[in-house]
Image: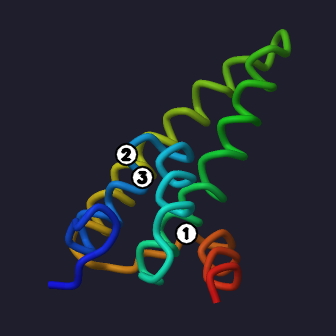
């Protein structure tokens, strides 16, 4: 098994990139210098969850459409679970658009 950040197996480190959404993505992106798979998952975590968090907070403050924020959070939770499971299984699941952007940033 390939080792990565903190001596973790690659699939465990990849899944950990998503645990605290964009926050762990930033941590793993800064700490992991060599493993491109872990760096991809870290970048995808940042590019997926940071904008969604910001958009959700902004929309949540707007009267009459604040309920849309709840829908965004629901999508985020489902996506979060899928990304953790897929990366732990060793799959390189790419979120549409964001996955390609993450791939370009890492390479």
Observer-nearest of 19 and 55? 19
Observer-nearest of 92 and 63? 92
Reading the chain from its start, which is encountered first: label 1 or label 3? 3
Residue 71, numbered label = none
Q: Residue furthest top?
A: 63
Residue 81: horizontal and vertical position, in percent?
34, 49
For label 1, the crowd category at 10 Å Cα-Cα, with few meaning under 14, some 14 to 19 and many 20 or more, is: some
Reading the chain from its start, which is encountered first: label 1 or label 2? 2
Which of the image's four quarters has the N terminus?
bottom left
Alpha carbon distance from label 1 to label 2: 16 Å
For label 2, the crowd category at 10 Å Cα-Cα, with few meaning under 14, some 14 to 19 and many 20 or more, is: some
Mark 1 and mark 3 residues within 8 Å of each other at the beta carbon: no
For residue 45, side relative to residue 62 (left or right): left
Observer-nearest of 66 and 88? 88
Q: Which residue is mark 2?
A: 19
Task: Give SS at disc 2.
Answer: helix
For the point 59% across and 74% down, the residue is 99
Report how many numbered discs are placed on residues in the image: 3
Quarter assignment of residue 57: top right
Alpha carbon distance from label 3 to label 2: 4 Å
Residue 88: horizontal and vertical position, in percent?
24, 66
For label 3, the crowd category at 10 Å Cα-Cα, with few meaning under 14, some 14 to 19 and many 20 or more, is: many
Quarter assignment of residue 11: bottom left
Quarter assignment of residue 38: bottom left
Q: Which residue is mark 3?
A: 18
For the point 66% across and 26% down, the residue is 69
Alpha carbon distance from label 1 to label 3: 13 Å
| Nearer mark to the viewer, of 1 and 3 | 3
Task: Give SS at disc 3.
Answer: helix
Residue 34: horizontal and vertical position, in percent?
46, 83
Q: Which residue is mark 1?
A: 95
């Amino acid at each position: 098994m390939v080792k990565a950040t903190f001596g973790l197996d690659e699939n465990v480190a990849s899944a950990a990139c998503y645990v605290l959404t964009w926050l762990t993505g930033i941590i793993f992106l800064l700490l992991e210098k060599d493993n491109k798979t872990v760096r991809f998952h870290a970048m995808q975590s940042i590019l997926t969850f940071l904008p969604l968090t910001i958009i959700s907070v902004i929309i949540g403050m707007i009267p009459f459409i604040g309920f849309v924020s709840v829908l965004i959070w629901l999508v985020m939770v489902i996506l979060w679970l899928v990304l953790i499971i897929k990366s732990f299984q060793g799959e390189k699941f790419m979120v549409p658009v964001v996955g390609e952007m993450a791939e370009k940033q890492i390479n």
